[in-house]
Amino acid sequence: MRRNLACFAVCGLLAIASAGCTGGNSTGHHKPEHARTASVVGRPQTANLVMARGHATAQYVITAPDPARYVFDVAVTARASTDVAVKIRTWYGAVFPSILISSHQSDACRLKGSRDVCLEHFPVLPAQRAGAWTVIATKRSGPATTVRITITFAKP
């Protein structure tokens, strides 16, 4: 009896803890809270994404301040022999598929030594919301590589 009671207590605590950790709420909808999204303005959010040989995808999460109030730049550095595309998926389901269509884009990228260095500028986006955005890099083929992505929000 004691063992069953102890097991019941431990399982109950684990269930409560996992609900708290997953951000669940009574409506079943997850809405991330980002109390200090404005604190990222002017501060680059950078990741070095390691990508395996062949077709590969890697991602990282940034914090976006109110896109209706801030512009943002996306800088991508990749090995020139690798073609990388970048998109962003927001916490509420919006997808920006053409953040960088190709790291070989002549209008956004320049060859510097053995690397493509790309820079894209984005205006305020009044229809979008602040919060966690997932930055996703994809390459279709080629050797293993590391892609550096930096996103910086600024006042217009």
Image (tube, helix red, strand yellow):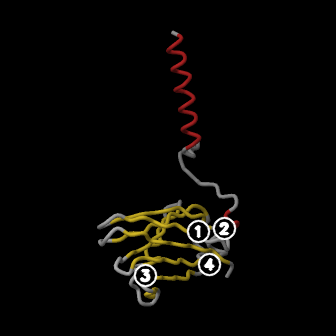
Which secondary structure, mark 3? strand
Disc 3 vs disc 4: Cβ atoms closer than 8 Å?
A: no
Q: Nearer the viewer, mark 3 or mark 4?
A: 3
How many neighbours does mark 4 have within 10 angstroms: few (below 14), some (14-19), or many (20 or more)?
some
Q: In which quarter of the image is residue 44?
A: bottom right
Which residue carries the number 1 mark?
45
In the rendered image, the residue lying farthest to the front is 113
Residue at 70% x, 61% y is 36
Disc 2 vs disc 1: Cβ atoms closer than 8 Å?
A: yes
Mark found first going from the N terminus, 2 or 3: 2
Disc 4 vs disc 1: Cβ atoms closer than 8 Å?
A: no
Whether residue 40 is situated above or below residue 12 in the rendered picture: below
How far is the residue under mark 3 from the one under mark 4? 26 Å
Left or right for 52, reference 109: left
Mark found first going from the N terminus, 4 or 1: 1
Which residue carries the number 2 mark?
40
Which residue carries the number 3 mark?
115
How far is the residue under mark 4 from the one under mark 2? 12 Å
Which residue carries the number 4 mark?
71
How many neighbours does mark 2 have within 10 angstroms: few (below 14), some (14-19), or many (20 or more)?
some
Image location of residue 74, percent across then percent down: 53, 77
Whether residue 34 is situated above or below residue 154 in the rendered picture: above
Q: In which quarter of the image is residue 113?
A: bottom left
Mark found first going from the N terminus, 3 or 4: 4
Mark found first going from the N terminus, 2 or 1: 2
Image location of residue 35, percent across then percent down: 69, 58
Which secondary structure, mark 2? helix
Q: Nearer the viewer, mark 4 or mark 1?
A: 1
Q: What residue type is labelled 4?
A: Val
